[in-house]
Amino acid sequence: MQDSFRLWHQTELMTSFKTNSFTSQEKRPLVLVEPNPRVKLGVKKLLRVSRGQDLVESIGWLSLLWVIFTFLIDGGLTGLTDLHAALSAVDRLSALVATDLLLIQTLLIARVPWLDRLYGHDRATLTHKRLGKPVLYLVIVHFLAVTWSYAMADSKNVVDEFLTMLSSIPDLVTGTIAFVLMIIVVITSIKITRSRLSYEAWYLVHLLAYGAVMLAIPHQINVGTDIAGKPLAQLFWITAYLFVGLNILWFRLLSPIVLSGLHGLRVSGSVAESSDATSIYISGRKLKSFQAKSGQFFILRLVTPGQWWRAHPFSLSAAPTDSTLRFTVGNRGDDTELMQSIKAGTRVILEGPYGVFTEDRRTQENVVLIAAGIGAPPIRALAESMAARPGDVSVLYRMRNKNDAALAEELAKLAKQRGFYFHILEGSRKSPRSWLPAGEDDHLPDAERLVNLCPKVAKSDVFICGPAAFTQTVEKSLHLAGTPANQIHSEEFAW
Amino acid sequence: MRRSSQILMGAVSLTSVVTGFELGANASTPGTFVPHPTVTPTPSPTTPTPKPTTPTPKPTTPTPKPTTPAPKPTKTPPASTVSHTSSPVYYRFGTVQLTVTKKGTTITDITMNQAGATNGRAASFPYLITLAKQAQSATFDTSMMSGATYSTQAFMQALGDALSQF
């Protein structure tokens, strides 16, 4: 081969996996892409991230402050001499704050790239979840206070007054429907009920939240004491709604469809990697323009009559190339079983890439990559693309059974080829509080065993991908071993 | 957020809440008296009225002319100035409470103790005061006003309450 000297890194290795009967694709050759040529190290580059975070958080905070400020200069808190005046102040303020938070909450889940780059999908989603209940409480306060204060004004009982309001005040019917929808959405999302619902049922109910947000708009703009008839306030709120709405419309709805169509994304095959993991290959044109990086994930939709409405998060399990993306997913859910039997040629819609679990956050020369179970795919991709000299990178792969671990063989070959340390940590734990398997040195605490495995761990960037509980215990060991918090990177998948 | 940014935002928040409150306290003092509008009777044209469900109370009571001219003759003691304050009237957009001053039988002054009316409706009170003094009654023609139906009702109720105390 004439090119072989130039393409030394692309040495083809054959994966030697047993192909199960349900695989639609025979084993593929392992082709490695060239790793990142260089990486900027040091904590200085993280300053840009924290500046961006501060900016975004400040804007969010200022929007809240603006709302409160305009309420105050309208005399919102003056003349509160009696219950009626106090109730009407509470009703207005709670509504204003709730609406602002609701818009922030909606934006957080819109998966907009500029937020994702700063926080990662997991942190944005977590904040979205945390805002759910406070927003609902504020809306409930608004509802009760407004009905009560109007009832006082008209000397009626609350129920009569509520019915009068529905019929006499414009846009209150839609406002009330929005209120009911919000209650339903939050109730279905709290832990107790969420765990009893299937993902699909929860998801469909959760879509009602968009309806709730939109149905609440008319009564704010037309009747809202602090908005109706006040051009500046109307401008602020309409701008805020448009900003959030357009971000969602483009980034969550249109852009994935348009880009997936333009790049001609289709399934080109699937391979069973182990008894509980499947790799899916997606092919398309000019995929570099997605600017996906190893360690990131996409949200994948199969465009088939039964599947188009269900989205699944899929992690890249190989460094992305211009023509192919490879994802590996655990066969846990109801649908992932299906993934193994996808026909090649099925169209897909990809949203993404998402996540900050990438080399961009690396600050040190040495890197420790820790995978557990089905956390292996992003680690496998990172190992392929990390800029490194032999010896810079250690890969730890925690697994139950060597013979049934997804991508283990690939990782081993990759490590051998690039000169990485590779440790397979196989077997059950010694104690429930340990994350390492039983072994010769299991009388030592985890942190010491970790240092024995990777002596430079305190001066390394550590990327952990695994179940949330695993990640937490590893992080504890890392703190004990002396790795600073800003060198620990993990991606929470339990959203 | 980094510590420095937190401190900055905290300072900004505190300042704006305090100034907002101060500005609000000043703004909510009763507006300056506006002479009775002869031609342009709509005080707050910006207000989109939340659909006045109750018709303007204009036609119900015919404006009482100076119906009580009887006790006018010299018999009455030298006209003394008496003030009475209404009880607060709660209504949809706030609270209204006013003090009426009478010299003899003539309403000479009406002051607003509480002029609660959101969304610019408070601008109607000076007009209402002028109209009430002209009519010398708790009910008067407000057909030249719009956008303050509820505030007008509350005002008339408070005025009637104050007058009933004389």
Image (tube, coloured by chain):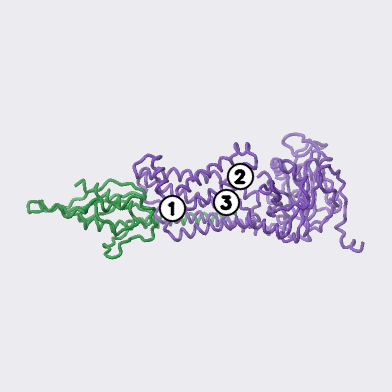
Decide if residue A382 is in sight here. no
Label 2 Cα neighbours within 10 Å, binned few <14 / some 14-19 / many ≥20: few
Which residue is depicted at the point 80% across and 37% down?
A427
Label 3 Cα neighbours within 10 Å, binned few <14 / some 14-19 / many ≥20: many
Residue B143 placed where, x, y %? Answer: 28, 57
Secondary structure at numbered mark 2: helix
Taking the view exactly as shown, the residue that stands out farthest to the front is A305
Do dots 2 and 1 share one subunit?
yes
Q: Are marks 2 and 3 in contact (CB under 8 Å)?
A: no
Chain B shade: green
Q: Mark 2 or mark 3, which has the lower sequence index?
A: 3
Q: Are marks 1 and 3 in contact (CB under 8 Å)?
A: no
Chain A shade: purple
Q: Which residue is mark 1?
A: A224
Q: Chain of mark 3?
A: A
Q: CA distance from mark 1 to mark 3?
A: 21 Å
Taking the view exactly as shown, the residue that stands out farthest to the top is A431
In the picture, which quadrant includes the N terminus of chain A? bottom right
Q: CA distance from mark 2 to mark 1?
A: 30 Å
Q: Which residue is mark 3?
A: A106
Residue A22 placed where, x, y %? Answer: 81, 43
* Near-viewer residue (B145 or B11): B145
Specify the amino acid type for callout 2: Leu
Residue A51 placed where, x, y %? Answer: 61, 58
Which mark is nearer the camera, 2 or 1?
2
Secondary structure at numbered mark 3: helix
